Image: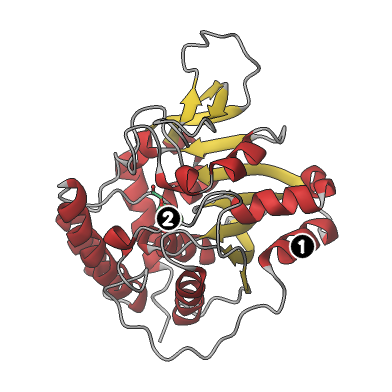
Amino acid sequence: MKKRKILLDCDPGHDDAIAIMLAGRHPGLELMGITVEAGNQTLEKTGRNALNVVQYLDLDVEVALGSSRPLVRELQIAEDIHGESGLDGFEFPDLERDFSDKHAVTFLIDILRQSEEKITIVTTGPMTNVALAMRLEPKIIENIEEVVLMGGSYGYGNVSPAAEFNILVDPEAAHIVFTSGLKVSMMGLDVTRKVLALPSVVKRMEAIGNKASRMFADLMNAFNENQRKVYGFEGGPLHDPVTIAYLVAPDMLTMKHVHCDIDLSHGVSYGRTNCDVFDYLKQEKNAYVATDIDAERFWELIEQGLKRYDDLE
Ligand code: RIB
Ligand code: CA
């Protein structure tokens, strides 16, 4: 099967870590690189977390550090959900790997410019690095197949009534991507809240009994404890891996082509993804928005993904 080339831009983050796990060994994907920015925690922590995950899972992929703050806003982190380290709940072995010597923006531009084939950009954090790359070298647009993001919602938000975290951290960056003219596929809270890492799910994955499943269980237990405290959820929405599910099994998601504006008004709805789901304004459609997900198939995908690490010592 021909592998789809992807670049993953993230802010690990518990759910980012699971997205890395799922993408790292999926037979249908070629993970060309990982870029990191500040988001769930400061860049120093999200960067270290990304490197820890790829080292622990023995993934042969470079990690490049990117932006330590959004384009315009001051950095807003999510320590209440991801903890002081940004990846609380699991003890990684001492870090021996190092980062790419390139800044994430240069890393993205170089890989995109040198690739013979188009590459899909997957973002599971604020879109700062990708937006900066598009502005620094607009020619990369012609070598991007699609942008698949975890972010936004056509319903309500999770860090304000109107806005979802990845978009609200850097609304201006999201605006640059959503107005790039590229195919943008948005996995928003509307579907990620349908895949909750309930205790029964954690138990199911822990029973696999390998290194990856132990990491999954420990991370999800910590993630769920904070989700319970903040939202009263029994299990946390496993947001970021939905982007990978969309890539490897697109029929698992139901998508709707809409016009979507990012609210930059600095009012109470700042950072909202305003999706015109009923096409009231008859504007040009610029985004595919996920409206439903087959949750049973999603958890099967996660289970298969974890089992691919059975050989890990
Ligand atoms: O709103 C959820 C998103 O924000 C997820 O990507 C989570 O990791 C945080 O980045
Ligand atoms: Ca994330």
What's the residue at 47%, 88% (across, down)?
95
Q: Is residue 4 visible?
A: no
Classify residue 226 as left or right of residue 281: left
Q: Nearer the viewer, residue 282 or 191?
A: 282
Classify residue 92 as left or right of residue 60: left
SS of the residue under disc 1 = helix
Q: Any mark on residue 111, and which? A: 1
Is 202 above or below relative to 198? below
Q: Nearer the viewer, residue 209 or 292?
A: 292
Does label 2 point to a residue whose CB lies under 8 Å from ligand 1?
Answer: no
Is 115 above or below relative to 256? below
What's the residue at 51%, 77% (across, down)?
51
Residue 9: x and y, percent? Answer: 57, 58
What's the residue at 62%, 66% (across, down)?
66
Amino acid type assigned to the residue bearing label 2 in the image: Gln
Classify residue 139 as left or right of residue 267: right
Q: Which residue is mark 2?
A: 76
Q: Is residue 295 visible?
A: yes
Is 129 above or below relative to 93? above
> Dot 2: within a 10 Å radius of its alpha carbon, few (fewer than 14), some, or many (20 or more) residues?
some
Q: CA distance from mark 1 to mark 2?
A: 29 Å
Q: Nearer the viewer, residue 279 or 291?
A: 279
Residue 53: x and y, percent? Answer: 45, 75
Q: Nearer the viewer, residue 164 or 187?
A: 164
Q: Any mark on residue 44, and which? A: none
Classify residue 108 as left or right of residue 14: right
